Image (spheres, helix red, strand yellow):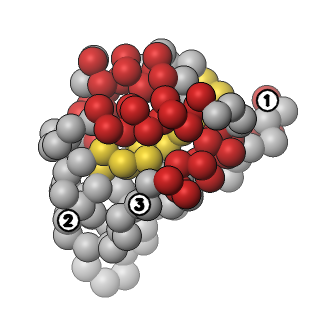
Amino acid sequence: MTGTKRKRKHGGGHRRRALGHAEPYRSCVACRRSAPRSELLRFARGPDGSVVVDVAARAPGRGAWTCASVACVRRAVERSAFERAFGAPVLGKVEPVVQAVQSALAQGGAPSALAAAFAASHPIQDFSPGRLAHPRGHA
């Protein structure tokens, strides 16, 4: 198929600027509240199928965003919101992730401080863009 044009996406943040938002907004998978990225926590599906906190918000594949509260993380686990957001089943236990978020929130601070505290106490696996990084084989 040489010579075919690919359709380009349009936008470039025009709507965001029109609404007066300085940074991208995301929706919590548990309570559906929309908030700036800096106020939410991003979770990713690891290569082994488990849920991990994506501290840098750079892991390949789909991500699931929740409010920086233990209630929203628990609600996402109970309502299978992570499975829906990832488009694949979550393997392994999610409770250790909930406990880690709870202990990091107990120390106080913004989600960015929470991410730093979580990264210091729980080393995240290295995500390599490959076939196992995304359930459908996309990186």
Q: What is the secondary structure assignment of the residue under circle 1?
A: helix
Quadrant occupied by the N terminus: bottom left
Between the C-alphas of marks 2 and 3, the distance is 16 Å
Q: Identify the residue shown where x is 81% and y is 42%.
A: 22
Q: Identify the residue shown where x is 15% and y is 43%.
A: 91
Q: Which residue is mark 2?
A: 132
- 2 or 3: tag closer to the N-terminus: 3
- Kindly identify which numbered label has been placed on residue 124: 3
Could you tell me residue 74's position as x and y percent? 37, 21
Q: Amino acid at mark 1?
A: Leu
Q: Which one is closest to the eye, mark 1 or mark 2? A: 2
Q: Specify the farthest residue to the bottom.
A: 2
Q: Are marks 1 and 2 in contact (CB under 8 Å)?
A: no
Asked which quadrant contains residue 129, the reply is bottom left
Pick whichever, 137 or 9, lies toward us.
137
Between the C-alphas of marks 1 and 2, the distance is 38 Å
Could you tell me residue 46's position as x and y percent? 29, 56
Pick whichever, 111 or 136, lies toward us.
111
Label 2 Cα neighbours within 10 Å, binned few <14 / some 14-19 / many ≥20: some
Q: Identify the residue shown where x is 30% and y is 50%.
A: 45
Q: Are marks 3 and 1 in contact (CB under 8 Å)?
A: no
- 3 or 1: tag closer to the N-terminus: 1
Q: Which one is closest to the eye, mark 3 or mark 1? A: 3
Could you tell me residue 70's position as x and y percent? 48, 23
Q: Amino acid at mark 2?
A: Leu
Could you tell me residue 111's position as x and y percent? 64, 38
